[in-house]
Amino acid sequence: MTLMSKPGVAPQDAQDDAAPLRVEPDAIEEAAKLLYIRACKILPDDIKAGFARLDASETDGTARTILATMIENIGVAERMDNLLCQDTGIPIFNVLVGRNVQVDGWALKEAIARGTARATREHPLRSSVVHPITRRNEHTSCGERVPVINIDFTDAERELRIEMIPKGSGSENGSFLQMLIPADGVAAVKRFVVDRVIQAGGKVCPPTIVGVGVGGTSDLCMHLAKIAATRPLGSRCTDAEGAKLEVELSEAVNSLGIGPQGLGGDSTAFAVHVETAGTHITMNPVAVNIQCHSARRASATFTPAGVAIGF
Amino acid sequence: MAHHTLHMPITEDQVRALRIGDTVTLEDLLFGIRDATQIHMFDHGRRTTFDLRGHAVIHTAPNLRKVERSGTNHSGYEAVCVGTTTSDRMERFTRPLMEREGVRIIIGKGGLREGSLDAFRDLGGVYLAVVGGAAALETTWIEAVEDVDLDDLNPESLYKFRIKGFGPLLVAMDSHGGSLYATVNAEAARRRQAVLEKLGAA
């Protein structure tokens, strides 16, 4: 994690524990621009470690060649300061607001959109966002309700975190929801995940992170799957039953032989991640959202000390 | 399993000599094509001024930087990052692309289906797999964005790339009915029952 000093943050005395952290829109705009470009270029350490793990255990010759090419690409992108993947994705920003933070929420949303458009124009990046019906591209990577901005709150004192995810479409098209019923049980949840991974095959750019949502409402279930798909490798579901499912399903999908790029091998998924939520007595929803091997993330954490840029 | 270096364009005999499992490196010219490009070409009746006969197309929509047009650069673009997109969405365009435009090679990721395999057999064509998501590397194989057509569809225009050492690519579907994807999918379907039994979900 590198530390970057930034005007517009923490104008208050850092020693004064009572003063709220104030984050200005200009700093958010700069961070949004920086994060979009950085996420497209530098893969998080946990994903790099995931590649090393698969590379060490893969037994199929073609699969080993493909994994080696993917690993080579990570190095080329960093050396040449280029994008890992041509797909700049749909920009998603997850904003976590801690306690004792002062921020203008409306201005924050506008600043994130401005930063996204500037990254697109100034780098330049391909704008991958179009109107859903006319298919018109404004060349800003923005559109109605895009960037996707999710805002949540934490108990972290005087901290605001912005996570940026450029979600690629090849794997986002590997999204599935089924409103199972209680009589179907957890067996049907497992069957659904295995069958959707088979259906997705090479189209979702394996090795993947298979995100699974279990429970909630239909929309929450889908959102859980996205949270699961974009969680760092090595993290575990906080629900014990969910964590058990992660272990079982990770082994299961890697026994199917789909392999990197759907061309055969052991390395179909880095992991299956599960997120859970309470659901209705009559419901048993399950959702799958897949993250491709270019599992890109970048984050900016605003504290009284400044802005820390990481993953 | 042989390695082939192909200077584009190629003949039907050259493409029928390729077998699944072979590797290929392309030289000279490559055309970039995408969802919107083909929707406009085949559903909306638009025609390209480019001669695609005997050529290879890649499923792509690149990141580009605007530059001045010059003697050799007719597109007004230079490549920032050129990669490959999932082919499956463009399955129904394989046959018209070959029949009407004379394309011999489709490059993509994730594979195409039975209809494309039939078109490759009937008309003489192959599908070459490039590693998806390895776009920084792929960009080093692109020398120039030489020309562009249907550019109102940007970034889903029809691009003419000057290439050097584009590959190695894997012959994943050939003109003899061979498809590595079909083999892998059949194997996954075969293993499914045992996987579900182990999960207690059969």
Image (spheres, rainbow, N blue to C red):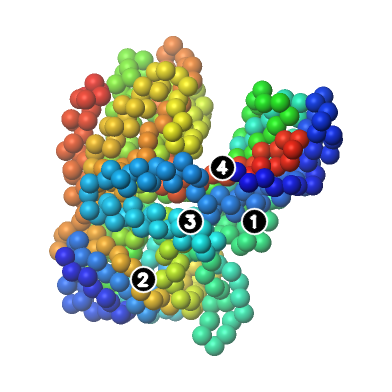
Q: Could you tell me how far apart the alpha carbons at marks 3 and 4 are, in whole angstroms?
A: 15 Å
Quarter occupied by residue A304: top right
Q: Identify which amino acid the numbered label 3 is placed on.
A: Leu
Please state if A195 lies on the left or on the right of A149 as rendered.
left
**Badge 4: residue crowd in 10 Å (few <14, some 14–19, many ≥20):** many
Q: Identify which amino acid the numbered label 2 is placed on.
A: Phe
The residue identified by callout 4 is: A311
Q: Which mark is residue A84?
A: 3
x and y percentages locating residue A297 in the rendered image:
54, 44
User: Which residue is found at the position 35% from the left and 24% from the top?
Assistant: A245
Q: Could you tell me how far apart the alpha carbons at marks 2 and 4 are, in whole angstroms?
A: 32 Å
- Number of numbered discs on residues: 4
- First in residue order: circle 1 vs circle 3: 3
Q: Identify which amino acid the numbered label 1 is placed on.
A: Ala
Q: Mark 1 near mark 3, Cβ–Cβ under 8 Å? A: no
- First in residue order: circle 1 vs circle 4: 1
Q: Mark 3 near mark 2, Cβ–Cβ under 8 Å? A: no
Can marks 3 and 2 be said to lie on one chain?
Answer: no
Viewer-side label of 3, 4 = 4
Can marks 3 and 4 be said to lie on one chain?
Answer: yes
Viewer-side label of 1, 3 = 3
The residue identified by callout 2 is: B166
Secondary structure category for the residue under label 3:
loop
Q: Which mark is residue B185?
A: none
Which part of the image, by quadrant, shows the C terminus of chain A? top right
Against B136, residue B187 (above or below) is above
The residue identified by callout 1 is: A119
Can marks 1 and 4 be said to lie on one chain?
Answer: yes
